[in-house]
């Protein structure tokens, strides 16, 4: 074997190159099932006619595939052996990597494996996630209550402006919409949240954790371990909850303690009736970034100034007058983008989970916005209060329509996307848009009439 490889290195390399393309691997793999005609391979590989013909020629030149009739192809013995060897090497290599990861995890959980007494501590105040779809509001409100701030999800969603925002991905309705915001927009939300009574320290790792699904690298595990130590110290020394992104789902949740090398949490699972189980520090699911919020200092609230700023922010977020990621659409226009996707995208490319989850979040956001504006209208008199109440009524009507939408796509990860359901859902979204625009108009009029209570 060594002699063959040394004497024919160039030819061996050319043979490997002939198969070294994802599309050509797909073609070879499809032929493992038996002879295929050209049209069937086009369907299975989703390649164009020209691309498939070119790849088949390359494979045929190296005798990995043979043409047995007009438009019909077969995998050769050489092709099968090459696939077998590649699959075996890949499987063994991946297996070794998994074993290495398991060994690292065992090192970090040595106390659990050896049956030693586990360290355990929870904060003294009750910190519970307030059930809601917009997990930032549920986790922050639950934490602030533990820190003796009298607030709820409406206060957090309204004061921060987060409830007023509609954000959807272009081309397909991805479930990332409610949280896929640029750092500048999140910074506005966080700073506004602080007006409720506590400053927050931000900790962040700017990449997804793990970068590869369910398979953190040793370096990523070390980053997660460092964060776990920081959170443990916060609980031991400050006796305060921490809000962490990536606890289950992924969503924001509350860390209220630790046991051994795991977080004791209160999360979104309360909303979907799942048991709240401790989460090993390395077993986080944090797409986009890994981040945590630590509550630092109690601050005096200037309610009048905070209310005016909240209304300004609500107008800004509702009308999409803030930074948005390039492949997303926000504000009233997001409803049209969403409706167009439901109407025009082929059924096999529709995302049921995206529609069900984003629908639930938008519905909840309309309800939060309505209630926040009603509370605000009760604090002011005259035209200002009248316009706030009118805006609240618009959001209420939008919420009722979105309840119909969530009835079409109830929350679950998979489901049917019947054409008639998609058409009806798209019509609902188009009906919501005028109420969004009318609400923005009345909020602007209320701001023009702003008076101190």
Image (cartoon, rainbow, N blue to C red):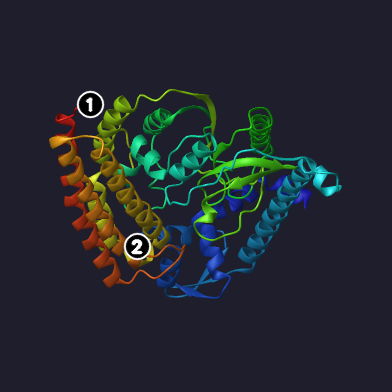
Q: Is residue 157 above or below residue 41?
A: above
Q: Any mark on residue 452, and which? A: 1
Name which of mark 1 and mark 2 comes first in the sequence. Answer: 2
Residue topped by disc 2: 406
Say which element carries label 2. Answer: helix
Specify the quadrant that holds the C terminus: top left
Q: Nearer the viewer, residue 208 or 165?
A: 165
Q: Position of residue 223 (x, y in %)?
A: 64, 33
Crowding near the residue tagged with mark 1, few <14, some 14–19, many ≥20 C-alpha atoms within 10 Å: few
Say which element carries label 1. Answer: loop
Q: Is residue 39 above or below residue 388?
A: below
Q: Quadrant of residue 243?
A: top right
Mark-to-mark CA distance, 1 and 2 = 39 Å
Q: Nearer the viewer, residue 300 or 177?
A: 300
Q: Residue at x 24, y 36 (%)?
A: 315
Q: Position of residue 190 (x, y in %)?
A: 42, 31
Q: Position of residue 10 (x, y in %)?
A: 63, 45
Q: Quadrant of residue 399?
A: bottom left
Q: Is residue 337 left or right of residue 190?
A: left
Q: Is residue 338 above or below residue 75?
A: above
């Amino acid at each position: 074997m060594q002699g063959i490889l040394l004497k024919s290195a160039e030819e061996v390399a050319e043979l490997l190159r002939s198969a070294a393309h994802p599309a050509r691997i797909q073609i070879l793999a499809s032929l493992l099932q038996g002879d295929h005609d050209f049209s069937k391979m086009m369907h299975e590989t989703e390649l164009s006619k020209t691309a498939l013909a070119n790849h088949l020629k390359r494979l045929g030149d190296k005798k990995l595939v043979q043409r047995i009739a007009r438009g019909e192809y077969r995998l050769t013995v050489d092709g099968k052996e090459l696939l077998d060897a590649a699959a075996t090497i890949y499987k063994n290599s991946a297996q070794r990597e998994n074993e290495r990861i398991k060994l690292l995890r065992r090192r970090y959980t040595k106390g659990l494996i050896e049956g030693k007494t586990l360290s355990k501590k929870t904060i003294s105040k009750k910190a519970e996630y307030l059930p809601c779809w917009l997990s930032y509001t549920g986790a922050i409100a639950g934490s602030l209550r533990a820190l003796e701030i009298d607030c709820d999800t409406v206060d957090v969603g309204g004061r921060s402006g987060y409830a007023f925002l509609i954000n959807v991905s272009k081309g397909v309705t991805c479930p990332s919409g409610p949280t896929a915001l640029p750092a500048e927009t999140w910074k506005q939300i966080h700073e506004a949240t602080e007006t409720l009574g506590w400053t927050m320290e931000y900790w962040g790792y700017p990449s997804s954790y793990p970068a590869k699904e369910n398979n953190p690298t040793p370096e990523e595990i070390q980053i997660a371990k460092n964060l776990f130590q920081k959170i443990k110290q916060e609980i031991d020394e400050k006796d305060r909850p921490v809000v962490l992104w990536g606890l289950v789902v992924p969503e924001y949740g509350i860390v209220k303690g630790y046991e051994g090398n795991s977080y004791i949490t209160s999360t979104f699972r309360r909303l979907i009736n799942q048991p709240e189980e401790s989460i090993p520090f390395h077993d986080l699911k944090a797409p986009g970034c890994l981040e945590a919020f630590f509550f630092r200092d109690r601050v005096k609230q200037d309610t009048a100034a905070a209310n005016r700023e909240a209304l300004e922010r609500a107008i800004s977020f509702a009308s999409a007058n803030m930074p948005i990621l390039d492949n997303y659409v926000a504000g009233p226009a997001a409803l049209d983008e969403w409706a167009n996707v439901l109407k025009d995208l082929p059924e096999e490319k529709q995302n049921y989970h995206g529609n069900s989850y984003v629908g639930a979040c938008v519905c909840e956001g309309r309800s939060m916005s309505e209630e926040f504006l009603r509370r605000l209208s009760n604090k002011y008199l005259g035209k200002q209060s009248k316009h706030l109440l009118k805006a609240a009524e618009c959001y209420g009507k939008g919420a009722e329509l979105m309840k119909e939408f969530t009835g079409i796509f109830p929350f679950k990860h998979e489901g049917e996307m019947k054409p008639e359901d998609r058409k009806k859902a798209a019509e609902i979204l188009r009906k919501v848009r005028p109420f969004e625009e009318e609400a923005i108009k009345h909020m602007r009029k209320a701001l023009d009439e702003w008076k101190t209570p």
